[in-house]
């Protein structure tokens, strides 16, 4: 069974063809990083306009790479939130039109659910598991009991981890996107050079990164000597420690032996190493998607959509995008 996945939730235009929810036949992602880099962050209006230009050629390329035509597609799976409303609108409207014209069933997928399902494109973790979803717009922990059965255990109260990476990178003059740049530059620095705060919010599993971001800003403004590599490494170390501690606490509090890491920040090399090391010490299993599946893509949307489809959860043409959409 072939599912066509479509994702335009932020600034990447993505389309993919996935078989049976776990085999990638094609996976096309067109990035807008070069467009937004000069602004130091994503400009929503520019993002949506670029999606409008790219959606048809990207979908066509995904179909051509897969060697299939629309009669071969069992369902169209589209992310309808959360995300930038103008960007989401492009993908949702295109998918509804394509579904209607080609008479192909339509499935609506929560973008965060897609991130969780990215692991099923490469592995088969048993339920239940703890899912830590860490991206530019979201930082949340879920208990996943099965396909479509999720309980939120914690979330950020302010900035998402990826957002903090972008803002600190901007403060240091590294540009956008900040995550990959800080990851690379931190390798050259001393992660213990600056003792930045680690806001663990002891009650519960929520996160907070705004205080850490402010501490970095104050350090840069008040220090006589600034070594950017050390600041990057020390900041990253604080974020990684917070995320690692919370993920392990969630697993242990729920008596669950498996942790899934997903979202764009899960590509961070220090976070991947920390989660693996600390989980092993605690006797827990960790599942990490390959780096290419950490960032936004449509294969994960197709994977999640497959399970909705086989369980009869279809969308109709009243489907509208939602900027805020809890899982």
Image (tube, helix red, strand yellow):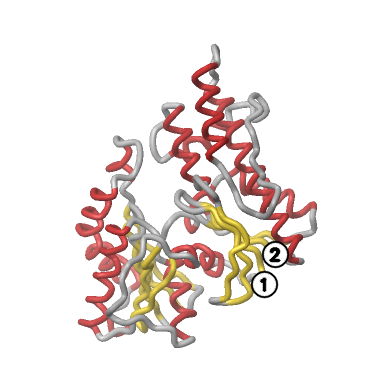
**Where's residue 113, x and y in %?**
49, 67
Point 35% across, 55% down: residue:
10
- Residue pushed farthest top? 224
Q: Left or right: 103 with respect to 206?
A: left
Tell me the quarter of the picture where residue 110 sits.
bottom left
One can see residue 116 in this view: yes
Quarter assignment of residue 130: bottom right
Note whether 310 is above or below 202 in the view shown. below
Q: Judge from the rendering whether residue 176 lies leftward or rightward of residue 259; answer left or right.
A: left
Q: Residue at x 29, y 69 (%)?
A: 92
Query: How many numbered marks have been drawn onto this rendered protein structure?
Result: 2
**Quick one: 72 or 273, which is closer to the camera?**
273
Residue 128: mark: 1
Residue 288: image location, x then y, percent: 60, 58
* Location of mark 2 (residue): 258
Does residue 261 appear in the picture of this structure?
no
- Image location (x, y in percent) of residue 22: 51, 73
Task: Name the residue located 46 percent from the left edge and 33 percent from the top edge.
Answer: 169
Query: Which secondary structure, mark 1?
Result: loop
Task: Estimate the spatial distance between the alpha carbons at disc 2 and disc 1, rounded to whole Å.
Answer: 8 Å
Residue at 66 percent of width and 42 percent of height:
241
* Label 2 close to label 1 by CB (< 8 Å): yes
Q: Say left or right for 289 vs 67.
A: right
Instruction: From this view, report whether residue 284 is shown above or below residue 165.
Output: below
Under circle 2, the secondary element is: strand
Give the class, few, some or many, for how many residues have Cα within 10 Å of label 2's Cα (few <14, many ≥20). many
Foreground of the two, 121 or 200: 200
């Amino acid at each position: 069974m072939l599912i066509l996945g479509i994702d335009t939730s932020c600034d990447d235009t993505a389309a993919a063809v996935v078989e049976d929810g776990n085999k990638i036949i094609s996976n096309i992602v067109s990035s807008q990083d070069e467009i937004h880099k000069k602004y130091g962050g994503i400009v929503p209006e520019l993002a949506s306009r670029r999606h409008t230009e790219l959606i048809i050629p990207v979908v066509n390329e995904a179909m051509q790479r897969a060697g299939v035509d629309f009669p071969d597609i069992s369902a169209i799976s589209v992310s309808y939130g959360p995300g930038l409303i103008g960007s989401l609108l492009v993908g949702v409207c295109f998918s509804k039109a394509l579904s209607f014209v080609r008479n192909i069933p339509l499935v609506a997928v929560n973008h965060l659910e897609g991130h969780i399902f990215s692991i099923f494109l490469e592995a088969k973790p048993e339920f239940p598991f703890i899912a830590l979803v860490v991206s530019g717009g979201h930082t949340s922990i879920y208990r996943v009991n099965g396909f479509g059965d999720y309980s939120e255990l914690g979330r950020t109260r302010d900035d998402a981890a990826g957002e903090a990476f972008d803002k600190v990178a901007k403060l240091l003059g590294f540009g956008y996107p900040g995550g990959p740049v800080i990851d690379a530059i931190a390798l050259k620095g001393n992660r213990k050079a600056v003792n930045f705060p680690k806001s663990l919010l002891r009650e519960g599993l929520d996160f907070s990164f705004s205080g850490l971001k402010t501490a970095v800003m104050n350090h840069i403004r008040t220090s006589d000597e600034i070594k950017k590599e050390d600041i990057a490494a020390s900041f990253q170390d604080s974020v990684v420690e917070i995320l690692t501690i919370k993920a392990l606490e969630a697993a242990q509090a729920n008596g669950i032996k498996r942790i899934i890491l997903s979202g764009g920040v899960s590509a961070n090399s220090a976070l991947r190493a920390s989660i693996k090391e600390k989980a092993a010490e605690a006797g827990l299993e960790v599942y990490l998607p390959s780096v290419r599946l950490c960032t936004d893509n449509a294969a994960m949307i197709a994977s999640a959509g497959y399970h909705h489809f086989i369980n009869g959860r279809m969308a109709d043409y009243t489907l509208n995008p939602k900027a805020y959409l809890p899982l």
